[in-house]
Every structure is written in structure tokens, then in C-alpha cells.
Amino acid sequence: MLQFTIIGNLGADAEVKEINGKKYSSFNVASTKKFGEKDETTWVSVLSFYSEKLHQFLVKGQQVYVSGDGRLNVFTKKDGTTSADLSVIASTIQLCGSKNAERQQPPIAQPTSGFDYVQKQQDDSGLPF
């Protein structure tokens, strides 16, 4: 099992999809590292089995901390070249910041297992997750 930890920004708003009757969020995170004057960006696809209440905060530009089970997917493109992408089934998501600093940040969300939803809990922010 590979465990990935990523800190980066969402490239687009998360999408809600469904597998075997269970809803999940799908989004891409860009993590950029500077090498001198050159930037190198790595994109990671993330699947999140969290409540729909978290989904509303997963918007383009939102900075997130994501950890979970990672996979390297190797595939052949239509032009015959081989490529790879990284994906994570999130076990932890924490919203770190965003381009819109006025947005209220919810707490860390952790599921009970990779395919179960987070059990709802109350905290000081009043958000039910």
C-alpha cells in the first residue's frame, strides 16, 4: 500500500459521481515545487467518500491537504505513447486556504474507512461534519 500526502490547490470545482450507489467527490489537486527559477507542477486525481456538505467547499483554487491510499496508473494514449497519472482515495482532507480569504474553513474530515461516509459530528463552527 502506498500512502500519499499532498498539499496543493484544486484545479477545478469537485464533481459528485456515483459508484455502486455510493456518492463520492472527484477532484484534481496541483502541487507545485520551485526548482530555482523553474516551477514543476504535479497533478493528482483524488476520490473522496465524504458527505456532500464537504463537497461545497471543494472549489477551484481551494488549497487542501490530502492523505490516503495512492496509486500510479500507467496507460497508453490514443497516439500510442505511454503515460502515467497519480490518484488517491482520500482518508483525510483538510482545507488549508483559498484565493478567497473571507471563506470560512470547515474542520478536518476523516472517514471511518475508504468507502464509508464520515460520521457526522458537531464542532465550534456549527458545521455538521
Image (spheres, rainbow, N blue to C red):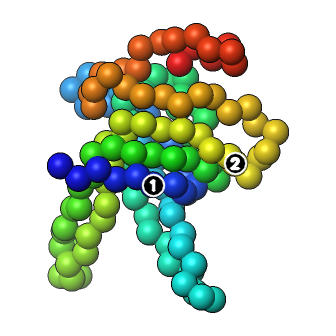
Kindly identify which numbered label has been placed on residue 98.
2
Residue 33 percent coordinates (x, y): 53, 73
Could you tell me residue 87's position as x and y percent? 31, 54
- Residue 75, quarter of the rendered image: bottom left
Q: Secondary structure at mark 2?
A: loop
Q: Amino acid at mark 2?
A: Ser
Q: Residues within 10 Å of mark 1 (few under 14, many from 20)?
A: some
**The furthest residue to the right:** 102
In the image, 28 versus 2, the foreground residue is 2
Taking 9 as reference, is 86 left or right? left
- Circle 2 packing at 10 Å, graded few (<14), some (14-19), many (20+), is many
Judging depth in this view, the residue of 66 and 58 nearest the camera is 66
Give the residue at mark 1: 6
Image position, residue 77 (x, y; %): 23, 74
Give the residue at x 59% y 28%: 107
Q: CA distance from mark 2 to mark 1?
A: 16 Å
Q: Which mark is residue 114?
A: none
